[in-house]
Image: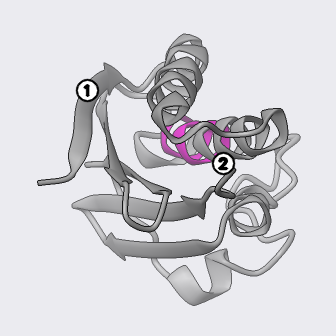
Amino acid sequence: MKDYFKLEITAESKNEAFARATVASFSLALSPTLEEIGDVKTATSEAVTNAVVHAYRGGEGIIEIIGEIDAKENSLTVTVADFGCGIEDVERALEPFYTTKQDDERSGMGFTIIDTFTDEMQVSSTLGAGTTVKFKKVFKKC
């Protein structure tokens, strides 16, 4: 059995810092470098912020975060799921600078940032049912 945690938070921007800290703390079991912790925190922030900003369109909602450690490969897998409106075109949403919030200050770089700071990333979405972002970070062994 892999070591894991499951966290449920309300989709409010104030909870993004809590999610970051939780995932970073959980990753300490893998003896990460400061750079690796920063990578995980950044990816988590982007995934949670995407859910807060886009999933519920200003309404109330829940974000579920699951972290799993695989000691054999010294990796952390994080799944961030919302149960909101979903993404109409995931392939297009994965393109750098694409955003559905044209009147906002959003850069459209969330998924690109997650992909850059992690070793693997998957995004799945169903209209009207939500979006799941899953990313994996493999830590260097000391």
Where the N terminus falls, by quadrant?
Answer: bottom left
Secondary structure, mark 1, is strand
Rendered residue at 46%/33% (across/down)? 29
Above or below 116: residue 68: above
Which stretch is magenta? 45-52
- Name which residue type carries label 2: Ala
Secondary structure, mark 2, is helix
- Name which residue type carries label 1: Glu
Which residue lies under the disc numbered 1?
8
Rendered residue at 30%/58% (across/down)? 130
Rendered residue at 51%/63% (across/down)? 135
Would residue 58 be counted in the magenta stretch?
no
Which residue lies under the disc numbered 2?
43
Give the tally of numbered discs.
2
Label placed on residue 115: none
Q: Nearer the viewer, residue 23 or 49?
A: 23
Would residue 51 be counted in the magenta stretch?
yes
Q: Residue furthest front?
A: 142
Q: Circle 2: is it few (<14), some (14-19), or many (20+) Cα within 10 Å?
A: many
